[in-house]
Amino acid sequence: MVELASWLTPHMALFGQMRRSGPLCPWPGGTAMFHTSFVFFPLENKDRAPYSSVTVRQHSTPTAMTVSWMGKQHAVTTNESGSEPLGPRSVDVFGQEDQHDIKYKRLSWPLVAVLMITETVSNGMLSLPSSLAVVGMVPGLIIIVFLGVFATYTSWLLVEFKLRHPEVHTMGDAGYIMFGPLGRDIMGFGTCCFSIFASGGQMLAGQIALASLSDNKLCLMLYIGAFAVPMLAFSLPRTFHGLSCISIASVLSILVAGIVAMAAAGISPDPSRIVQVAVPSNFYTAFISVTNPVFSFAGHFMFFVLVSEMKEPQHAMRAAYTLQSFATIFYAIFASVTYGYIGSTVQSPSFLSLSPYWQKVSWGLALPNLLLAGSLYAHTASKVIFVRIFRHSKHLHSHTLLGWGVWISLVVFTNGLAFLLAVGVPIFNYLIGIAASLFAAWFTYGIAGMFWLHDSYHDGPGFYAWQQKWGQASLAVATILSGIFICVAGLYVTIRAIVDAFASDQLPSPFTC
């Protein structure tokens, strides 16, 4: 291994901190060559422009490398051949794709915004009017808007972390950077677990939609099976770009369905409805209702995976701003209008509170969104495992029998597991709440603060960096504390709800109609 620092260290005393800004890549002409850049920043003021940059190029066979510094070429002798100044973890997971069969990095930021909206704004919004019925119109809207702003802030923290660490593909990779192998395994498992549970949740929503459309003429388990088959098919493309175009229809689907449902509620409002500005309640009742808007913004677990497939990841925040603006505004309007016309008797999902005709119209319009969101979740769980297995392997980028065989097997496995959970576990709805509390609460809220604290500490002068930016550090700590609160409180109310359901014998038997 070349100790590049041995050559650069004498110069760092003059120039300050060094930051890497380029990946390893093949050198044109067929000769493998490592290529990276470093930018020097003055120690006394990290916000100033860099003094100069150093570009390092090293052949894979000769024992020498060329360093370009301030416009001059410097030859640096190495002690061993084939050495790498930077390890593979410093490289974007998909690398240079010009010669690859399967190209992942094809997404523009508008397509990423569409995918983000598809996976975030789905059946979760249908529970928001019932949340307003529990806490009242004003507190409910305040919570929705606050969570939208909060989710935007944590989106920024996640994107900044991703841009600093291009090798991060999943929450598991981020966990490795901060906590080592154990952090990678726990956060990687959490991503897969929540993705599969969310996919099963979409199957349950699809079951309700199909049952409503057919007046409950079939066994409910058959509805889930009928929904799971096309969901599996839509999960099969190897890249998100293969799902992005049909996701446009998914966004239009949930948007039009929401508008039609609001219009239907306005056409036939409940004449005896009760709409309250604020509703007094105890902690358990209020928080179990508040978890609906909390987890309606819980799409951050897919951000790293999506940004990794962008052509220009530096524009990822444009997609995040689009998502959070759309979600916050649409959630607030949909929840307030539906609750305003139907009142305290509004059900969850809210489409069930409409007249039979408008129920069918709304569910029919929403079906593409429910289907595509479930496919994205299953696709994500499969890809997390697939990339973990074949990272830096030809099977990741080439049409190999092993690569496609493993990919199809993973897609079938994740969709099949989601199906078995949805039809075979009577408390699956509650388990989704537990998974959301354990993982989504951290991925969407709490862990984003850790990302900022980690990078500011290691990129700057340790704890002094936190003192210099005490406002941002305070926000990061508050973000972590909010994640702890949502996690603990969410677990408490969900487990208590399970106990109450068992006590009142409200749980159905597994694999029944």
Image (spheres, helix red, strand yellow):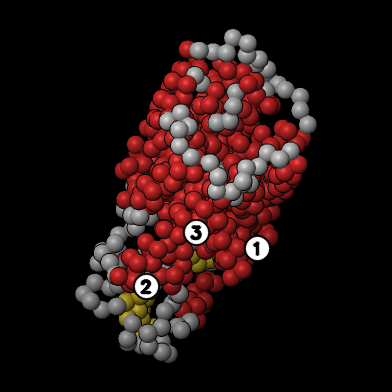
Q: How far is the residue under mark 3 from the one under mark 2?
A: 17 Å
Residue furthest toward the bottom? 79
Q: Residue at x 48, y 76 (%)?
A: 8
| Mark 1 or mark 2: whose residue is earlier in sequence | 2
Q: Earlier in the sequence, mark 1 or mark 3?
A: 3
Residue 226 found in image quarter? top left
* Residue 373 at x, y percent in the picture: 44, 43
Residue at the spot x=43%, y=90% of the render?
79
What kind of residue is marked 2? Ser
- Report the residue that reaches farthest toward the right: 282
Q: Give the distance between the C-alpha atoms of the residues marked 1 and 2, in whole angstroms.
A: 36 Å
Does 34 sit above or below residue 323? below
Q: Which residue is mark 2?
A: 393
Tell me the residue at 76%/24% (across/down).
280
Q: Secondary structure at mark 1?
A: loop
Mark 1 or mark 3, whichever is nearer to me: 3
Q: Are marks 1 and 2 in contact (CB under 8 Å)?
A: no
Q: Does 213 appear above or below 185?
A: above
Residue at numbered disc 3: 170
